[in-house]
Amino acid sequence: MSVAGFKKQFYKASQMVSEKVGGAEGTKLDEEFKDLERKADVTSKAVVEVISKTSEYLQPNPASRAKLSMLNTMSKIRGQVKSPGYPQAEGLLGECMVKYGRDLGDETNFGGALVDAGETMKRLAEVKDSLDIDVKQNFIDPLQGLYDKDIREIQHHLKKLEGRRLDYDYKKKRQGKIPDEEVKQALEKFHESKEVAEISMYNLLETDQIEQVSQLSSLVESQLQYHRQAVQILDELSEKLKERCVSVINEAQNRPRREYIPKPKPVFDFPEPDQSNGGFTPSVAPPPSRNSDPYLQFGRASTRKPRPLSEQACCKALYDFEPENEGELGFHEGDIINLTNQIDENWYEGVLRGQSGFFPLNYVEVVVPLTH
């Protein structure tokens, strides 16, 4: 930093201390400017909060959002073009219905109905995915662009204006010790920054609001399109289930009622007992050997396992973990997994039986911690 730059920073810091501690008054901005600044600040907060709440509306499960974010990050690191999408609740329900419908059999009434409903739910999940894409492209991304460009630019201009105001006020109070030309130059820079900040806020509040209303309209249009398609899909399922109900009722009415006839119970002939205890010879467990395995007690294997002797960072699985996405590492309760990396506060990366992948932190207990 040059000497002039250092002096300027010193002037601003001194003036700030005088105002905060000593109660000195600085140059006041006009009410019109303050009103613009207040509205711009509210707009900034509104954009940030609306983006956050819209993401929660589209993807309500916070754990799934965090996991999806982590998977997308891993995909970028590995250079994968396609990353997994958000697991829609309709899709998960549909897969469950189809699975058990197939297990029951398509030929059964309930099994066939489950399959029909499950396929419909999976179609609803696809429509929901389309809603996610449309809202992100036409609403979230434009708002994020507005914040990253226009609002951040306003914040920069206001910060610069505050710095030049402090510099001007410091020099103004020390006229005589500081040349008049320098004070005049500080005042000109202050007015220049004020004008730039005022124009940027005015453009945001007056001109860009047309775009924000258009983006909000796109959000509502995407929601309408989603609900129209959902109603159409559910109407088709409703008609199909009604037809199935009528068919079942007609079949039941035309079919003669069958009474349940219990099967005869089997009769067992027991031979005369040879001994007073009913003819069963009790089995006597052999006494434990002195040289037996220390982990075998009372004729069964103990569940305890020796801790690893190596200093390799590792952890012990507390529960079974079934991988659901590419890159996840599956394991069973009691497995010892070598730790290679902690991705974030929720996920580890490790190696088990030659396979590497990542897994949730709360499924394991650390035996030998990672060293950094």
Image (cartoon, grey):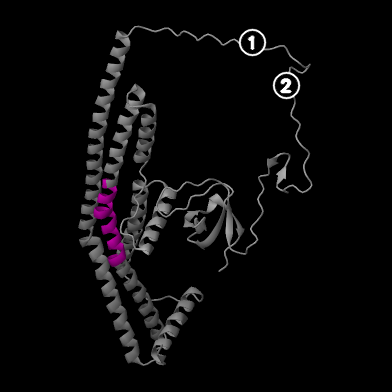
Vertical comparison of 130 with 147: above or below:
above
Q: Amino acid at mark 1?
A: Asp
Please tell me which of labels 1 and 2 falls first in the chain: 1
Query: What's the magenta region?
Result: 130-150
Does residue 218 appear left or right of residue 327 in this picture? left
Give the structural element (helix, strand or loop) at label 2.
Answer: loop
Is 226 rendered above or below residue 218?
A: above
Q: Which mark is residue 166?
A: none
- Element class at badge 1: loop
- Residue 210 x, y percent position in the rendering: 20, 57
Q: Residues within 10 Å of mark 2 (few under 14, many from 20)?
A: few
Q: Dot 1 corresponds to which residue?
A: 269
Can residue 28 be seen from the camera position used here?
no
Residue matched to label 2:
280
In x, y percent, where is residue 347? Answer: 49, 56
- What residue is shown at x 33% (from left), y 22% (from top)? 109
- Give the residue at x 74% y 47%: 292
Quadrant of res 211 = bottom left
Residue 309, image x, y percentages: 65, 61
